[in-house]
Image: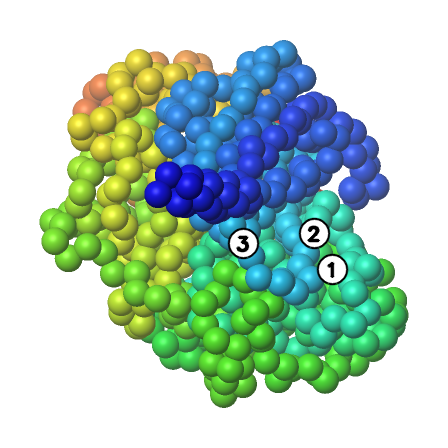
Amino acid sequence: MASRFLLITLICSVLLLSGQSTAAVVEYEFAIDVKEVNLTGAPVEALAIDGKIPAPTVTAAVGDTLRATFHNRLDVKTSVHWHGILLPSDQDGVPYLNTQPIGPGKSHTFEFPITHAGTFWYHSHTDLQVQRGLYGAIVLTEENPEQAIEERVVLFSDWTDEPVDSVLTNLKSRDNFYAFKRRTIQSWDKVLANGGEAIRNRLRSSLTRMGPMDLADVGYDAFLVNGQQVSAFEDIDSSATQVKLRMINGSTSSYYEVEYASGPMTVIAADGQDVMPIKVQRLRFSTAETYDVLVPIVSGRASELRATSIDGSGYSSLFIGEGQRLAAPDVPRPNLFLTNHMDMGESTSMPMHEHDEHAMPMHEQEEVAAPMHEHEEHAMPMRAQEEAVTPMHEHEEQAMTMREHDATSMSVQAAERMTMEQDVIAHMTDYSALMATESTQLPASQQWREIDLRLTGNMERYVWSLNGKTAREDPQILIKKGENVRFLLSNDTMMHHPMHLHGHFFRVVNQHGERSPLKHTVNVPPMGSVVIEFDANEEEDWLFHCHNQYHMKTGMNRVVSYEDTSLFTADVEKLIRPSRRWFDVNNFHAMNSFLDYELSFADERNEFRFELDTNISDSYEIHATYDYYFNRFVSGFAGVEIREHHHGKDHDIGIAGLNVTLPMLIDSEWRVNDHGRFRLELQSELQFTRHFGFDWRWNTDNEYRYGLNYRVNNRWLLTLHTDTEYGDGVGVKFFY
């Protein structure tokens, strides 16, 4: 009996040890430092991890413990967030909220268990450091994966040679600052050229006080894939018939249209979560998302995977395989003139073919918008076309074998049948086609909490918010552990917003009901809506924010706090909400007959404005006011006006009133002075062409100023003006 017990004990011990043999502590040690790069022909200071942009790929398996140490060699604080990974809240990496920032010359070690597989990424959550290069891929595999097919990481990003702080300042200075660089100014000559529908759309939007539509904020100098404008995977196994691509959109603010030269891509995972395989010809790839796709390999050819910026201003190219290069199709620039603001919204529950044309009718615009490379002026990797030949589709119908995709439990035959029988989606713009491989329904026994979140803000002042309030004004969303939480996300703006929830996966509710897909980041399209649901099964505090970093920085974020365990105190809030930042804007107008200087300091709600008009010799006007913005259309102001003209001093008076944006985008000033005298002033501007514009101002004192402008670049304009006080003149305008 004793010997039998000893034998059983020995066998159990061996089995236990063998079961644990695959788990390990996976250790990494990285240095964060400054690095000079030249991606566009100009040397620029960037930030890098171990001297690499993107950073080295972090890999681990389910059951492992990941231990990563980061040494900060910068002279500023930094941080590391593990995007999409479920982990203890103190390891999430958001400075002060979850993890202490890594100070200059300091180090920090993250350590947490790996509980799920998938494609994810890590990046700085400090200031705008991700724009400067602090991002890298994460590949988490199953504990005991089956034999997998060959795979590669594909990390897309955007790049600007400008200092990132200057980018944000420029965005705050003028609502169309980068539109000139991106060649997306919505001028009236183009409206007229697109006919009656475009004219009606423009008039309808102007009557509702909506400005011309745009799809991007920043004018980038380059778009990158794995750190280059053009990259290649030439070391693919020659016997391989397909390759798995772990695609990551690590951009700061860019969306892409992704297309492969040698046939449709088979999507098998989204945000690290398995989905039923679907074939897609062109995939809209939102900021901060990940997709796993299978693509066919064409023998003797290098097929292009092209990621075109959603506004058509540039693209990056990845060539897969060896041999003559096959070019992916050109993506025409979107024709925004034929898109009606009032009915362009999308819903994830709509079948894709019913609304694909509403969000961005790229695939229908070939007759009205030339392929971007024919007229783009910056950062275009044209050498991608040097050896291009007609795309081949020899392997379009090749089925995916599930033993080659280690994370899917379906049989090989079922997977092949689904892939072969389904239609190819020409342009996947939302999530209605995504279906989870199993039920994602939340526990039926739990109570529900439903929260309405309107995505609000505007390009005019570049302030972004939720429910009309920035994070400084309304920082927190409270939930309770053990309940089901539903966010009703509705986008009241004309921009896309990629909303990301830390520490959770949520259901994106769509037509597939109980098998709605799980994600950690969801795009909410312009004027559209999305419903997400998640099990509140964590503790403490997690950030929820727009992953357009410029939107997040200007107010579009909240802390989701578990009521009983939240550590989000007033002191923590002060740390994560830095001191109020004021942005200054300077406009200088020099004419042969007068000088005009405008200076403003503004934050989310408040603005101090100063304006000086003078003819240098004997006349001047000074206006100094404080403005408070109630919303994007109305602000109240109070201040003083000082005038002195050639006939003597007119007056020093106090003034107060309202600034109201009227239909047709006319700015009105309704004011009264300290003598009780009322005055109404109206002003607006029209953009005739990309270069030529007209501005005007008139008030009930019969004072006016009219001007014709020629835009030289983002900052300089040549002007011809007439003014009731100073007469006619020619000169220049300068914005800084």
Residue 326 in percent (x, y) is at: 79, 73
| Residue under numbered circle 3 | 144
Query: Left or right: where does residue 703 sit relative to residue 636?
Result: right
Q: Camera-side residue: 208 or 659?
A: 208
Residue at coordinates 39% horizontally, 67% vertically from top-left? 437
Residue 563 can be seen, yes or no = yes
Marks 1 and 2, how far apart in space? 7 Å
Nearest-to-viewer mark from 2 and 3: 3
Does residue 305 appear left or right of residue 217 in this picture?
right
Helix, strand or loop for disc 3: loop
Q: Quadrant of the C terminus?
A: top right
- Amino acid under disc 3: Asn
- Which residue does the numbered mark 2 point to in the structure image? 225
Residue 286 rendering spot, x and y as whole percentages: 50, 55
Q: Is residue 41 left or right of residue 152?
A: right
Task: Kindly identify the amino acid type of the residue bearing the numbered disc 1.
Answer: Leu
**Residue closest to the eye, 475 or 626:** 475
Badge 3, how many Cα within 10 Å: few under 14, some, many 20+? few
Mark toward the viewer: 1 or 3 = 3
Contact? badges 2 and 3 (CB < 8 Å): no
The three-letter amino acid code for the residue at tag 2 is Val
Question: Which of the 4 image quadrants contains residue 315?
Answer: bottom right
Mark 1 secondary-structure assignment: strand
Q: Is residue 445 left or right of residue 297?
A: left
Residue at screen point 38% across, 17% down: 575
At a point 21% along the width and 20% down the height, the residue shown is 675
Mark 1 and mark 2 residues within 8 Å of each other at the beta carbon = yes
The crowd level at tag 1 (other Cα within 10 Å; few <14, some 14-19, many 20+) is many
